[in-house]
Image: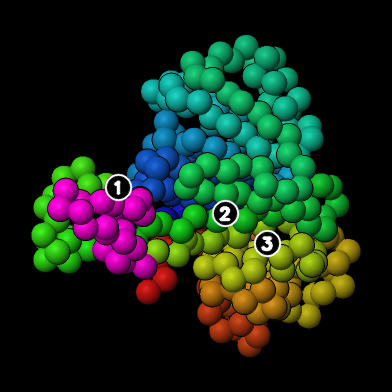
Amino acid sequence: MDVFFLGTGAGMPAKLRNVTSIALKLLEERGTIWLFDCGEATQHQILHTSIKPRRIEKIFITHLHGDHIYGLPGLLSSRSFQGGESEVTLYGPKGLKEYVEISLTISQTYLKYPLKIIEIEEGIIFEDNEFLVEARLLEHGIPSYGYRVIEKDRPGTLLAEKLLEAGIKPGPLYKKIKKGEPIVLEDGRVINSSEFVGPAQKGRIVTILGDTRKCEAAIELAKEADLLIHEATFSAGEENLAFEYFHSTTTQAAMIAKMAGAKQLCLTHISSRYDRNDWQTLVQEAQTIFSNTDIALDFKEINIPFEK
C-alpha cells in the first residue's frame, strides 16, 4: 500500500505544485489504484509516473470545487484510449453525476468501459472482503467529504513447519486450517486450526480529507490512522484567514492528528503564497504539536507498512 501525490497545491496550479490529486496504490493488495480527487492536468501528471490509468478502479471526489474535479472528464476520456476496459466507479457529493455526464455528452465522448457514479452520503460507502471506506462531511464552503480507508485484518500465516511436525502433510487440509475450520484427521485426531496459524495481521488505515476547517468529523475519520493526509492551506498564525475561507493551518492539522492518535501526518493543499523556501517552516510549525509530520510534494510517494 503506497500513497502517491499527483498534485499538492491549493486553488490553482503553480510551477511546483499542481492542483489536488492523490493516488492510493493497491497493486499488491488488489492490483488496482484508487484516485482521490482529480484536479486539472492530473492526467498530465500521471504521464511522468509509472501509474497506468487502466489500473484505476475507483475515484473518490471530496468536493466539487474546480481544483479537485476539472481534470476528471479528460482522465476518464483518455483512459479509453489507453486500453482501459474494466469498470470505474466514481464516488462523490451530489452534483458529481450531472457534471460528468454533461461533460462527456457535450464533448461527445464515448467510454469503452462501464462507468458507475455514486453520489454519496455519510457512512460506509464501500465494503468488500478486503477494504471498507467510510465518508464523513467536513466543514467547507460547499459539501466536502473526508474518506477513511480501512484495510481489513489479514489471516495469520500458516505455520507449515509445525504442521509437518504434527504429521500433517501439505494438501487440501492446509487451506481449511488457514480458514480456521475444525479438522478431523484420518487417525481420529482432532486438530485445532488456531494452533497452526500465526496471529492475524492488522490492516492499515489511511485517512484522506477534503478541504476543511478544523472539525470533529476530521478527528473521527483520522482515529488511529496509519497515515492522515490533511490540508494545510495556511501557516500557523493565520487561523482567522483559514476560518474565513473554510480551510486549515499547519498547526490545526497537527492538532487533528494528535487528538486522533494518528501515527503519521502529511500536509497537503499548500497555498502558492508559500514557496519552496517556506515549506520546511510549515513542517516545523506542525511538528511543534505532532512530531511525525511531513509535507507532500508532487510525485512524492509514501509507503504504509504493516504494523510490526
Between residue 176 and residue 240, name the one nearer to us.
Answer: 176
Q: Is residue 151 above or below residue 69?
A: below
In which quadrant of the rendered image does the C terminus lie? bottom left
Q: Residue at x 61, y 49 (%)?
A: 133
Residue type at mark 1? Lys
Mark 1, residue position: 176
Query: Residue 297 magenta-drawn?
Result: no
Q: Left of 241 or right of it: where is 47?
A: left
| Disc on res. 149 | 2
What residue is drawn where x is 28% and y is 52%? 183
The residue nearer to you, when weighing 151 against 198, is 198
Query: What amino acid is labelled 2 in the image?
Result: Val
- State which quadrant residue 246 falls in: bottom right
Residue 243 x/y as whole percent: 86, 67
Q: Residues within 10 Å of mark 3 (few under 14, many from 20)?
A: many
Query: Residues in magenta?
Result: 176-199
Residue in the image at 72% along x and 20% along y? 102
Residue 59 shows up from this direction = yes
As measured in the structure, the alpha-carbon distance from the residue carrying label 3 to the one carrying label 2 is: 9 Å
Q: Which is nearer the eye, 263 or 44?
A: 263
Q: Position of residue 34 (x, y in %)?
A: 51, 43
